[in-house]
Image (spheres, helix red, strand yellow):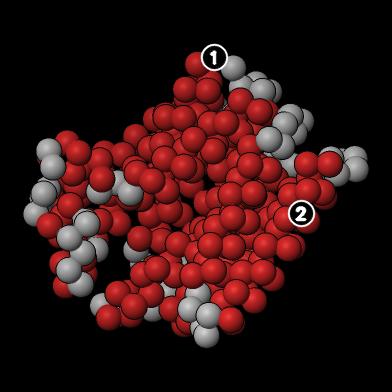
Amino acid sequence: MSRALAVLKSSHPEPGGAVTVAMTLLAIGVGHRGWAILGVFAAVGATQLAVGWVNDWLDADRDAATGRTDKPVASGAVSRRTVGIAGLIAALTIPLLGLPFGPLPTLLISLVGVFALLYDWPLKSTVFSVVPYLVAFGLLPAFVVVALPGHPAPPVWLVAAGALLGGGAHFANVLPDLADDAATGVRGLPHRLGATGSTIAAALLLLGATLTLVFGPDGPPSWAGWAAASASVVVLPLGWYATRRAQGRGVAMFRAVIVVALIDVLLLIFSGRVV
């Protein structure tokens, strides 16, 4: 693996890229055009790069202790110092990328970066670990809307849906790493609730996001909205039932949660003009 590729992999490109692309598509949907689309992509991307790099910088010892050879720092593909410097540069870039949109959008995207980094430290190992996800994911669509010409206020339902989606993503994202995290002393809210509790929390939060995106906008829900809500209501119980039939193995429920998360992201992206 080349050094550049190792640095990129240390940023957690899959989830970070997914969030960046989703917010960029939302920007197009709410009416951004031209350079503003690229600006949203860059500003949101900087928040995701910062939180990913700082996470791997902080977790280097933990990752090495649990044999995480998939992590470039733990495997020796890139130095911890390099990843830390990359995270610092990305974090300092966030407000600069917000400036072309004006003071309020700059403040919002800066707060996204601050709360994302607060998850890395010190909230990751506390009962408040979900708070940065709720706040940062609520502020992301707010930034996208406020960055429009005239700086319109974001609708409450859009902010709420983003927060619920972020909270659900936190519980779903931690599920595969519960054992490794517990072995190295990480005790966030998902670890305190356990696999079953975290799965239920993820499902309820994501279902809440679905219903908010379907019923929040003015006017009656669209047929696509009804279909999304129906699918979410059906998929989650089926995942729970399959998990019980498998004698406690949570794979089916985890997959059901991911399906609902995908539905929520699509609803968010295609929410259309919100002002």
**Image quarter (top left, top right, bottom left or bottom right) of the N terminus:** top left
Instruction: Tell me the residue at 33%/49% (across/down).
Output: 12
Q: Residue at x 78, y 56 (%)?
A: 230
Q: Look at the picture and state if 104 lies above or below 180.
A: above
* Residue bearing the label numbered 1: 34
For marks 1 and 2, the one nearer the N-term is 1
In the image, taking residue 134 as reference, residue 112 lies left or right, namely left
User: In this orientation, which residue lies closer to the viewer: 146 or 21?
Assistant: 21
| Residue at the spot 30% in from the left edge and 46% down from the top edge | 11
Mark 1: amino acid: Gly
Q: CA distance from mark 1 to mark 2?
A: 33 Å
Circle 2: residue type: Ala
Residue that numbered label 2 is attached to: 229
Residue 137 visible from this viewpoint: yes
User: Height in image: 247 above or below 159?
Assistant: below
Q: Is residue 52 left or right of residue 214?
A: left
Q: Where in the figure is residue 273, as x and y percent of width and height?
A: 74, 29
Give the class, few, some or many, for how many residues have Cα within 10 Å of label 2's Cα (few <14, many ≥20). Answer: many
SS at circle 1: loop
Q: Quadrant of residue 123?
A: bottom left
Q: Nearer the viewer, residue 156 or 102?
A: 156
